[in-house]
Amino acid sequence: MIVLQQLINGLQLGSIYSLIALGYSMVYGIIMLLNFAHGDIIMVGGYIALLIIGAGIHPAVAIIAAIVGCMVLACVIEKAAYAPLRKAPRISLLITAIGVSFFLENVAQLLLSANPRSFPNTAIIPTANFNLGSLNISLTTLVTLAVAIVSMALLTVLVNRTKMGKAMRAVSEDMGAAQLMGINVNRTITFTFAIGAVLAGIGAILYCCKYPQVKPTTGYLLGMKAFVAAVLGGIGSIPGAMLGGLAIGMAEVIVNALGYTTWADAVVYVILILVLLIKPTGFLGRTMSEKV
Amino acid sequence: MKKRKQLSTPSKYVINAILVAVLLAGGALLYNSGALNRASKAVLIQCGIYSMLAVSLNICTGYLGQLPLGHAGFMAVGAYVGAIFWKATTAWPTGLTIILGLLVAGLAAAVFGVIIGIPALRLKGDYLAIITLGFGEIIRIAIINLDGITGGTPGLLNVPKHSSFLLTFLCLTAAIFITHNVIHSRHGRAILSIRGNEIAAESCGINLTYYKVFAFALSAFLAGVAGAVYAGFQGSLFPKSFDFMASINILVMVVLGGMGSMTGAVIAATVLTALPSLMQALSSYRMVIYSLLLIVVMIFKPSGLMGTKDISVSRFLEKLMNGELFKSRKKEGQAHE
């Protein structure tokens, strides 16, 4: 029974990681950029929700504001910092992404102090528990799972069934050819960032409901884990990111349950290193050959 | 065509050695004369340590063209190994302990460099960045958890304070000398060719893995020595000083100075270390400014302040001898002198 309980915890954590990993994976798939700032967008989303609920405004407004805020922020970052470097070497783009991530983190620290603030999670999802035998499932868990499943289903439809989704797939396949076919590459890239950020915003709310506090460095470790999830699943692959997220969530819960809490963060990196050494393409990634 | 006058290699060495000796002696005199207060002395030593770190990271980032994000991890290994060695050997003659401690620290970091380098360097670009970041974090988490040896989060205290002005800057000089000579050797040319184009380098018979691991280990060695100097300067070590933020700090110096320029690395390290301490009002904005600098430099001048250029006294003298100092510069290829 305790195994099943941990499994449910892992599923909850894993689905949050999946949502965030999708953002990494889609952006990497389209412009080959490891978007370091993605984790910090989550932190910003958490703060927006926290401050709006703190001001006494209805939580539904806060959720929408957080998601829209993340989306706008991601588009601004893409336009201001990444778009000018479209043709630059990838190392420049990566350094810029690190710069953006640190900029967000430090601005948040300057404006809101480095101390963690507690997140009003009960205002969004009321505390309620359901008991199935000795199994204890909270409402937060159920909501998280439901929201994650619906979001991923919508994303799959968006990517596979709509015109914009088709454009996204085309650009990630071959940017030059896509442009020749009349696809607006820049708009498609911005759209990809926006979708990733919407998922990050949803992930931010769900994460803060599970661990009800926000601090400027919240995004760093969360982003790191989600990135590992994306690599584990095969970067660039949408079902891969979902699978990878669940695997990382499970792994973390297992390590914690075994009592190695202080090593839990190291385990994520060990998984990353092992994946990269054994199967760099991850579960569902495609092998890419380099053109000379 | 008139033959260009040139300095012979030994005379270049002599000129540089004299210059270095004068600078070191002058610096030491100033340092010990009492003209500086304690805070500025500390800043001076820190500038030396960070210059050393920037020079060592520059081997990987500037010359090899990779982006390791776990440099603080190597520094941490060197710092802890050096500190523990020094604490264990307080009974030995001071000079011997200091030199052995620095060597042991550097070698320990180099061993980690090889262990991390062999798997990491099979990957490229973003993956290499992220895997080195992971290793750096693992080193830090291990230091926190192995508190029997390292003191864990409360820190390793009472490290003998061996890092004088002379020791710090002698180490910096040695680091620059070693790096300069390696980069201008056969090994160095191989490393530079990897930066140029990996596939082309490999097809010319350059063993990619060997040279990458070599550069990585050298970079780690120097970072380890810098770490030991840091330990001997601070007198106490905390795992928090070696987090991801510290690695980024060093990276900013290299990027800003110009990837592939040692002069740039030293100048950027000195400026970025000295500025926040000199302007107290700036210190809370430090990281915001650093991160903005990273973005702005990447967008507007991706090669950094110095590009791949270095300042060379002997080249300056040669130009003076030939009377071409004020003439327009001839095309000399990449100025790697």
Image (cartoon, grey):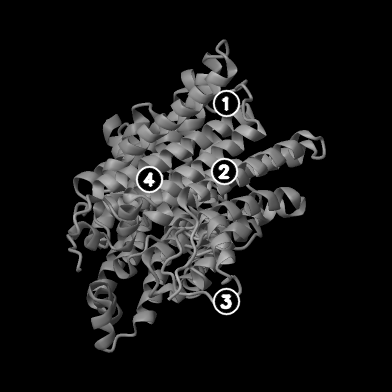
**Which residue is depicted at the point 42% across and 39% down?**
B220
**Which residue is depicted at the point 50% across and 28% down?**
B102
Residue B258 relative to residue B191: left or right: right
Q: Which three-letter amino acid code belongs to the residue tagged 1?
A: Gly
Residue A121 visible in the shown view: no
Give whichever of discs 1 and 2 has the lower sequence position: 2
Give whichever of discs 1 and 3 has the lower sequence position: 1
Q: Residue furthest top?
A: B91
Q: Which residue is mark 3?
A: B327
Q: Which residue is mark 4?
A: B132
Q: Which three-letter amino acid code belongs to the residue tagged 2?
A: Ala
Give whichever of discs 3 and 4 has the lower sequence position: 4
Give whichever of discs 3 and 2 has the lower sequence position: 2
Q: Which three-letter amino acid code belongs to the residue tagged 3?
A: Lys
**Which residue is depicted at the point 38% across and 28% down?**
A260
Letter of the chain that mark 4 sits on in the rendering: B
Residue B155's label in the rendered image is: 1
Q: In the rendering, at what x and y percent does residue B3 appear?
A: 44, 69
Letter of the chain that mark 2 sits on in the rendering: B
Residue B33 relative to residue A24: left or right: right
Q: CA distance from mark 1 to mark 2?
A: 39 Å
Residue B17's label in the rendered image is: 2
Q: CA distance from mark 3 to mark 2?
A: 28 Å
From what the image shows, is residue A91 above or below residue B108?
below
Q: In the rendering, at what x and y percent does residue A274 appear?
A: 25, 41
Which quadrant, please, contains the N terminus of chain B?
Answer: bottom left
Q: Closer to the camera: disc 4 or disc 2?
A: 2
